[in-house]
Image (spheres, coloured by chain):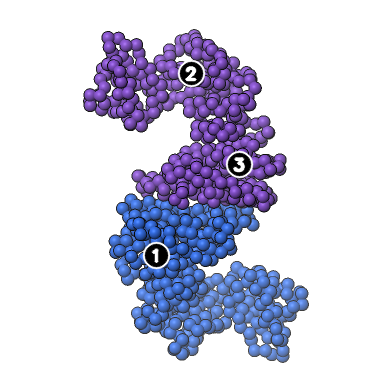
Chain colours: A blue, B purple
């Protein structure tokens, strides 16, 4: 039998009614002849409640106990989903991580999947079970302790199962109905994409699109698992949602597939730094040691042996970055005249796999922004992405103008 | 190191504060030099919530999924207790049933314990762990599925661990401070017992004393595990609570140790039954097949080949008992003139292991009740217990008079 993996997130299993709704979707796929592996999250709110208990009990908690406590929410949903399916006469049973067993590293609360043996579940499929309901987000270490995979771990669980069982597809049911060309709350012309390439999805995910976790997209790309993102709140046809797949399965690659934005970015400038070999290392080593996620970096043209160095980092890390840099200055490792933080900025990115073969995207982007009178503060590019920092007040305008200019409201 | 088992019920771990309070008690025993095994229930209310989910999802649920869902509450408490102990610098870790592994039969939701291997936990004690926090109520079947032991299963888990680890004692922390000579809400002279014999505790438990589950007392008696019942809500000394132990450890056995009462008893009388061999079997077989828990049975003297047959059963089974008996009559298996149910009765029992060697307890009991003008409707006796059914309105009076008459307010 072909295998299908279906993953339901916390809002899709938030109540017994929603679990029933999800189970009906599973029943539809079983009726088509699939052996189905369902991956479930905890009922929404449960994981946060358990995390709260742990943090209140022990601020610097033993991650092994954290995992043992926090993983219990998924176990509840897995059992309830199996019971719901049984009520619909669909042969189903639940599997906790250790029952599979889903083997992981011992990096508790951010473990990586090492192996998913298929024997136990395949034997049950052979005996007539149609649905294996697996508690997402959790596994077991070689020491026999329960591990969790970190935030978004259930998406990762789903993709890993799809890879291990050579599934035809991995359907991620969530509270949005697919991947959009941009945020529909900002741009009413935003259009749902039928297909998007892994690389594009990866860029969008890391730029803040919350639809899929970066890690699960990486895994899907590595094992070429077709991912489909679709809504658990609507009746779904076979072509619903957005298919995330290898670019070779997309006939016409878009030059630009989407426009992303992020408010959560601050710009920091070190004014008048001595421009000598090793200065970049001297600046960014203490930042890295303090756990600052530096994103974009720009160095001005040097004048009289001194330069300005600008970088961006998440807004909530500004204070920590300032502290790290001042400490490095006091220790004599770096020398600068002033340190200016600007939290009134945002990052706008255009992403498209077709950029690889098309030139002129950057030039067009800069012209569109310039025509609107928007000043660009920092630029960074990758093979399939161009990002700029601009004043935050222009965010909506920039997204809408770029969406129009690249004809994203029209299907390719 | 000597091993101590400590069990905390749902109300004793209902909040993070109460868990801290319980953990402090554990710390006191660790400081005395014990290796401690802590058995925890789910936070009070959690198990009922999960059972509600299951029953709403699937009225005739698959007991294997029921067990997978319902057991998760204990896992949460076990992790939180381990974290709390770690915060107090007590080396501790949690164990779920399958990690021990606590092996049980496959009778899901009422499984019996088959084996508790001690190797894993003892190895950790050898490595410096001072407390193993074990999720109560749960185990694993030989098929690798999660099982639960049924209501009161955490008490049973605790006693079984005490037996397996040859523990010095098994302390059951609960919301009462011990076993009383009678219900303090009915008789203000009720006195807490320092010690009580297993057999007495068994009788009291099966007569409705809610302190300990019958099954756990049976197990303690079989393996001679010293049980101590005490309150988790008070500061405790080494002599607190009530010790349930072998009668040989009790210097002066009481003739009567306690007076028990139960409102949950109804009296049913079959009037004018043909008195022929096999009539008792003809009456009680259909009752047993309908799952009626018949307690006391009395047969009147036969007159003209006919007799009256009286028995008692739980109040909530009266309707079912009537139905079973009428069906048996319609089928011609039994013949009676009338069937009278009296739900306005109660059962009063006196229990004492000293009755074995002392005569006159029954006579004294009947005289006390007679002196108060209380009519006895049915009598039943065992080696260490005498029970009577009386009108419910005399319940308090009977308990108080018997408590006085047997000097239960005075220590032996």
Residue B217: mark: none
- Dividing the picture into quarters, in which one does residue B38 lie? top right
Q: Residue at x 73, y 72 (%)?
A: A327
User: Is label 2 in a helix, a strand or a loop?
Assistant: strand
Label 1 packing within 10 angstroms: few (<14), some (14-19), many (20+): many
Of mark 3 and mark 2, the one earlier in the sequence is 3
Q: Are marks 3 and 2 in contact (CB under 8 Å)?
A: no
Q: Residue at x 55, y 39 (%)?
A: B160
User: Is label 3 in a helix, a strand or a loop?
Assistant: loop
Residue A90 at what x, y percent from top left? Answer: 32, 55
Q: Is residue B304 visible?
A: yes
Q: Which one is in front, A44 or B37?
A: B37
Residue A347 at what x, y percent from top left? Answer: 53, 76
Q: Residue at x 60, y 37 (%)?
A: B170
Which residue position is annotated with label 2? B386
B15 shown above or below A1: above
Disc 3 or disc 1, which is closer to the eye?
3
- Dividing the picture into quarters, in which one does residue A278 lie? bottom right
Total tally of numbered discs in the picture? 3
In three-dimensional space, the C-alpha distance between marks 3 and 1, rounded to whole angstroms, equals 44 Å
User: Is label 1 in a helix, a strand or a loop?
Assistant: strand
Which residue position is annotated with label 3? B165
Residue A191 at what x, y percent from top left? Answer: 38, 75
Identify the image quadrant of the N terminus of chain B: top right
Residue A5: mark: 1
B22 shown above or below B360: below
In three-dimensional space, the C-alpha distance between marks 2 and 1, rounded to whole angstroms, equals 64 Å
In three-dimensional space, the C-alpha distance between marks 3 and 2, rounded to whole angstroms, equals 37 Å
Q: Residue at x 50, y 32 (%)?
A: B214
Q: Is residue A211 rendered to the left or right of residue B325?
A: right
Q: Are marks 2 and 1 in contact (CB under 8 Å)?
A: no
Disc 3 or disc 2, which is closer to the eye?
3
């Amino acid at each position: 039998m072909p295998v299908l993996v279906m993953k339901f997130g916390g809002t899709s299993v938030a109540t017994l009614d929603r679990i029933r709704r999800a189970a009906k979707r599973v029943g539809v796929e079983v009726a088509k002849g699939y052996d189905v592996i369902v991956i479930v999250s905890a009922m929404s709110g449960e994981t946060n409640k358990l995390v709260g208990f742990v943090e209140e009990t022990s601020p610097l908690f033993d991650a092994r106990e954290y995992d043992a406590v926090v993983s219990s929410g998924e176990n509840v949903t897995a059992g309830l989903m199996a019971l719901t399916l049984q009520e619909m006469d669909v042969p189903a049973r639940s599997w906790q991580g250790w029952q599979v067993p889903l083997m992981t590293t011992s990096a508790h609360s951010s473990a990586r999947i090492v192996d998913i043996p298929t024997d136990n579940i395949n034997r049950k499929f052979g005996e007539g079970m149609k649905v294996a309901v697996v508690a997402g987000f959790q596994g077991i270490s070689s020491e026999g302790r329960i591990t969790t995979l970190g935030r978004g771990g259930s998406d990762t669980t789903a993709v890993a199962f799809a890879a291990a069982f050579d599934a035809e597809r991995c359907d991620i049911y969530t509270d949005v109905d697919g991947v959009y060309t941009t945020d529909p709350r900002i741009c009413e012309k935003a259009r749902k994409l039928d297909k998007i390439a892994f690389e594009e999805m990866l860029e969008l995910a890391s730029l803040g699109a919350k639809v899929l976790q970066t890690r699960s997209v990486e895994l899907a790309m590595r094992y070429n698992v077709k991912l489909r993102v679709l809504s658990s709140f609507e009746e779904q046809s076979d072509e619903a949602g957005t298919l995330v797949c290898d670019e070779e399965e997309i006939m016409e690659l878009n030059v630009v597939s989407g426009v992303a934005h992020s408010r959560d970015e601050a710009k920091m400038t070190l004014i008048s730094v001595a421009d000598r070999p090793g200065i970049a290392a001297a600046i960014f080593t203490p930042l890295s040691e303090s756990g600052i996620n530096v994103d974009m970096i720009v160095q001005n043209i040097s004048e009289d042996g001194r330069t300005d160095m600008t970088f961006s980092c998440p807004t909530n890390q500004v204070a920590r970055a300032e502290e790290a840099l001042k400490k490095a200055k006091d220790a004599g490792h770096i020398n600068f005249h002033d340190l200016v933080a600007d939290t009134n900025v945002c990052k706008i990115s255009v992403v498209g796999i077709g950029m690889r073969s098309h030139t002129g995207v950057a030039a067009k982007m800069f012209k569109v922004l310039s025509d609107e009178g928007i000043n660009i503060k920092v630029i960074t590019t990758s093979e399939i992405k161009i990002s700029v920092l601009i004043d935050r007040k222009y965010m909506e305008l920039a997204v809408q103008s770029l969406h129009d200019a690249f004809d994203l409201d029209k299907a390719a």
